[in-house]
Image (tube, rainbow, N blue to C red):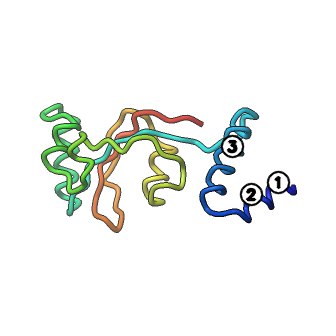
């Protein structure tokens, strides 16, 4: 316990290092945060979101092409790729879909304060 207090009293950088060490040790015990990878498309209206979803599911356009062409998010230039993230790093509306719904399926529209999203979960670790 003394080691924890010592680390927490140093500075923010040391807290991050301690957290990473603690997380690695806990992961080896089977206790760790779920992570996922996903991509998304952000648009202004629900109608636009539904139209894109129809085009993607009917294979008129790929998810990556639609993201590059229509997404209002900078990730659109990478096909909507959001990379790997842990539960709690995204807005709650995202987490609800990403950590419970089916993989490799286009989900949405999902409404957030940013607009309407189509989400495709590409991988998930539990």
Query: How far is mark 2 from mark 1, CA to CA?
Result: 6 Å
Crowd rating for badge 1 (residues with CA inside 10 Å; few <14, some 14–19, many 20+): few
Disc 3 secondary structure class: helix
Quickly name the residue at label 2. 7
Mark 1 or mark 3: whose residue is earlier in sequence: 1
Who is closer to the viewer here, 118 or 17?
Answer: 17
Left or right, 2 with respect to 110, comes to right
Is label 3 or label 2 in front?
2
Left or right, 14 with respect to 29, comes to left
Q: Residue 81 appears at what percent x and percent y?
A: 32, 41
Who is closer to the viewer here, 102 or 80?
Answer: 80
Q: Residue 50 appears at what percent x and percent y?
A: 22, 51
Mark 3 or mark 2: whose residue is earlier in sequence: 2
In the displayed image of the protein, which residue is found farthest to the bottom?
113
Query: How far is mark 3 from mark 2, CA to CA?
Result: 12 Å
Image point 17% across, 55% down: which residue? 48
> Looking at the picture, does residue 37 appear above or below residue 12?
above
Image point 13% across, 46% down: which residue? 69
Disc 1 secondary structure class: helix
The C terminus - image quarter: top right
Left or right, 125 with respect to 10, comes to left
> Looking at the picture, does residue 101 appear above or below residue 96?
above
Crowd rating for badge 2 (residues with CA inside 10 Å; few <14, some 14–19, many 20+): some
Quickly name the residue at label 1. 3
Disc 2 secondary structure class: helix
> Looking at the picture, does residue 106 appear above or below residue 59?
below
In the displayed image of the protein, which residue is found farthest to the front?
10
User: Mark 2–mark 1 contact, CB under 8 Å?
Assistant: yes
Quickly name the residue at label 3. 21
User: Mark 1–mark 3 contact, CB under 8 Å?
Assistant: no
Numbered disc total = 3
């Amino acid at each position: 316990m003394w080691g924890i207090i010592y680390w927490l009293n140093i500075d923010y950088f040391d807290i991050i290092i301690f957290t990473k060490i603690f997380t690695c040790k806990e992961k080896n015990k089977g206790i760790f945060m779920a992570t996922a990878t996903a991509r998304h498309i952000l648009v202004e209206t629900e109608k636009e979101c539904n139209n894109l979803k129809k085009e993607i599911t009917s294979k008129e356009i790929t998810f990556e092409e639609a993201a590059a062409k229509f997404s209002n998010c900078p990730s659109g230039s990478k096909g909507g790729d959001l990379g790997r993230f842990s539960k709690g790093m995204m807005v709650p509306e995202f987490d609800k879909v990403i950590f419970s719904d089916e993989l490799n399926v286009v989900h949405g529209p999902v409404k957030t304060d940013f607009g309407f999203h189509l989400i495709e979960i590409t991988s998930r670790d539990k």
